[in-house]
Image (tube, rainbow, N blue to C red):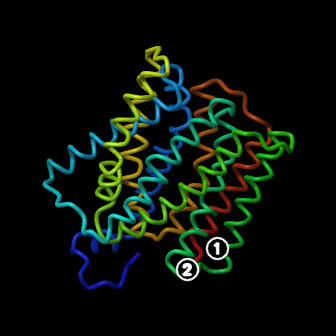
Amino acid sequence: MTTGTSTAPAAPAAAASAPPARGTLLAALGVVAFSLTFPSTVWGLESFGPWSLVAVRSTLAALIAGAFLLAMRVPPPERRHWAGLAVVAGGVVVGFPLLTTLALQTSTTSHAAVVVGLLPLTTATFAAIRTGRRPSRTFWIAAVSGAAVVIAFTLQQSGGAVSTGDLYLFGALLVCAAGYTEGGRLAALMPGWQVIGWALVLCLPLMAVGSAVALSFEPVRLSAHGIIGLLWVAAGSTFFGLYVWYRGMAAIGIPKASQLQLAQPLLTLVWSVSVLGESLSPAAPLAAAAVLLCIAVTQRARS
């Protein structure tokens, strides 16, 4: 993905023109990291309240990112990029983790994973509006088909009802898609790890204060699961996952990278059964096959 500006640094331009296969691999690694987020969040909720978990995870991730930025002596972004970084921070660092954590208090990880399967279509729509680039008709047919499978599976699992947890999840879709889109655009101007790094650092003062306040109001019951869950959502999902994800988006484009996330709910279903012991619906294998087919079509469709 290119921006057409002649003042972009050489290194980000090289990242943006990386081979498509490498970009696909990086985005896929991000999807694997993200797929472990919900199970890890459930583990984290064994030790922390929802507000404490989100604030502490973001604070830890921001400290990791800040350490990397200092070690690499990365200069601050140009002033014109801070508004975009604020969108990334609000959507990816704060909004999505908070809304999904609140949802997971009443929803199972498998149910939440299927609802969030709508994220690729939501991201592709935001990207089309934000960048003015229009994917092909084949791309949209496959994307909408994948989303339809996700919606049908969700309604079948919930008996056709929409719960408060679902409303949290739908809100999470909107804010995360906005953050992904803006982050993908910025990843063409600076390395992807710097995009998420500076977005995290931007949130550090707010999240540090939020951690102190939330921990004083919500009980803490430390356990092995809780600590592992917290560490993964902080270092694995929030930092590493977003680092490789934004690099992948810069290489293959926002719409195609977003469609790889159709595999995310399927992977999360696997973790929900193998790690959390949740029961899997008989409809899941059929949904998996249909969604994987849509992924294959969208990856071959040209913008």
Q: Residue at x 28, y 57 (%)?
A: 194
Answer left or right for 81 relative to 270.
left
Secondary structure type for disc 2: loop
Badge number at residue 303: 2
Q: Is residue 173 above or below residue 104?
A: below
284 or 50, which is in the foreground? Answer: 50
Element on which disc 1 rests: helix
Residue 50 lies, in percent from the top left, at 53, 30
- Between the residue at mark 2 and the residue at mark 1, the CA separation in whole angstroms equals 8 Å
In-front residue for pair 79/252: 79
Quarter of the picture holding the C terminus: bottom right
Q: What residue type is labelled 2?
A: Ser
* Position above or below: 145 against 200: below
What residue sits 53% from the left and 41% below the top? 98
Which residue in the protein does label 1 denote? 139
Q: In which quarter of the image is residue 284?
A: top right
Q: Which of marks 2 and 1 is nearer the N terminus?
A: 1
Q: What residue type is labelled 1?
A: Phe
Residue 78, image x and y in percent?
A: 24, 69
Residue drawn at x 50%, y 50% is 31
> Answer yes or no: do the residues labelled 2 and 1 have beta carbons within 8 Å?
yes
